[in-house]
Image (tube, grey):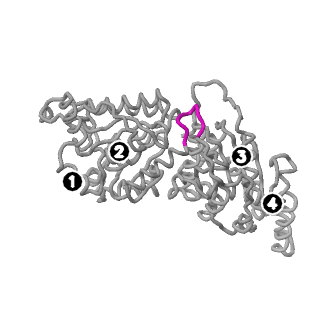
Amino acid sequence: MAELHEIRAQAVAGPSEKATAAQRAKGKLTARERIELLLDPGSFNEVEQLRRHRATGFGLEARKPFTDGVITGWGTVEGRTVFVYAHDFRIFGGALGEAHATKIHKIMDMAIAAGAPLVSLNDGAGARIQEGVSALAGYGGIFQRNTKASGVIPQISVMLGPCAGGAAYSPALTDFVFMVRETSQMFITGPDVVKAVTGEEITQNGLGGADVHAETSGVCHLAYDDEETCIHEVRYLLSLLPQNNRETPPRVNTGDPANRRSEKLLDLVPADGSRPYDMARVIEEIVDDGEYLEVHERWARNIICALGRLDGQVVGIVANQPQTLAGVLDIEASEKAARFVQMCDAFNIPLVTLLDVPGFLPGVDQEHGGIIRHGAKLLYAYCNATVPRISLILRKAYGGAYIVMDSQSIGADLTYAWPTNEIAVMGAEGAANVIFRRQIAEAEDPEAMRVRMVKEYKAELMHPYYAAERGLVDDVIDPADTRVVLIRSLAMLRTKHAHLPSRKHGNPPQ
């Protein structure tokens, strides 16, 4: 027993104090400290702590540390089982070798079999070059399991150091990617290779840092300034997700009354459809205690994707943001919302869609960039979703964007509107210019005629009750009752059963 305790102490301590000091000098925690922050105190159960590699050559036979540079196991977060693996940068720079990969494969298989979330704490230098192709094959096994687990258990990647080359594809296959500013980077080819091939000079953070991926590429869902805050938010996200695709997210008694009216909404949203406002404040007013977690907050800001609670039940919220690009749909917004809708549908999270959309963004760049196929991704995601779906039209809902944003015609279970709604093929002025072009051109006072025709078009086809009269909107509601109506509707839809046709899988637009 004394020998066992000594070996375990050696495995827990890591390679050396010098290696630990070097890790801290970079502003980073050790792998075990990160696991302690993530899991409930005393709940971690380690797997294959005494595993060592069997490789030889290039001096490896003389260096056989316990754990082989990755710590694997399971514990609990708020009492629910979570599986985790964490790269130990102090050992081989966290590089992946055959034994290292086998440990990760095992813990991923265990997570899938147990039906529990998997969190990876990434801080590795890629494949272990000394082990050659065996290391690359290890990555293949991880990718295969990421794909097998997709939509079955929540997968969360937390980037706490470098992640380069093929290793970056594992986080890209998971549901959520967290990053820490200054200390984490992701890229396929590093700055040196970029300079050699293209002549461009750039830093690691400039190429693949947290801010770049949170604002420009959309690879990162959430970015934070330090590891402690980042890992704390991972715990919060886990509290909003179910254990697997056969369960629903846990209900929490928030204490926020289900019958609370939201009088502030009357002042938050201007009746004038051309005036901007902050949709985030609308969401705060509707959800329990004003708390929600926004995903991709800094990428494609013209649309909001968030997880929150209504009467303690988790919901996914997709909402246009009039403060950015007037809330139009473009390539990035469509991709962002489509992936979020798919995630919510996979994990039994009801969807609430808040519409204030003037259409798709026009422009040569958008058309040449494939707005048709990218917009179709969002359409496909909504049409394919079987969870409860409720849409609410606050103001504008024009053209194809109205249809795509979970209209009744593509399967929304319930559709509501505020008295300020304007549902139409296009705005009144544009429509009048098309329909009454000849009358306006031939009039003695074209401007006066145009104003008259706009008013006539609005009165005939864009009044607030036009869609409701035709059954395209289930009810026009008092904005102050929005929270109450949504909660009652979701309660009714909780037992919804919907089935898609039998098929191997769909072929979504790419």
Q: Which residues, given as a range, are shown in magenta?
A: 241-249
What residue would you read off at disc 3?
390
State the residue position of label 4: 419
Residue hosting label 1: 21
User: Which numbered disc, 2 or 4, marks the residue that appears first in the sequence?
Assistant: 2
Q: Which residue has dot 2 on it?
A: 122
Q: Nearer the viewer, mark 2 or mark 4?
A: 2
| Residue 243 colored in magenta in the image | yes
User: What amino acid does circle 4 point to?
Assistant: Pro
- Please state if 460 lies on the left or on the right of 23 as rendered: right
Which of the marked residues, 1 or 2, is nearer the chain's N terminus?
A: 1
Report the Cα–Cα distance between label 3 and label 2.
37 Å
Percent position of residue 488, x then y: 75, 46
| Kind of residue indicated by mark 2 | Asn
Q: From what the image shows, is residue 392 above or below residue 35?
A: below
Q: Position of residue 196 (x, y in %)?
A: 25, 52
Mark 3 against mark 1, which lies toward the viewer? 1
Secondary element under disc 2, as helix, strand or loop, is strand
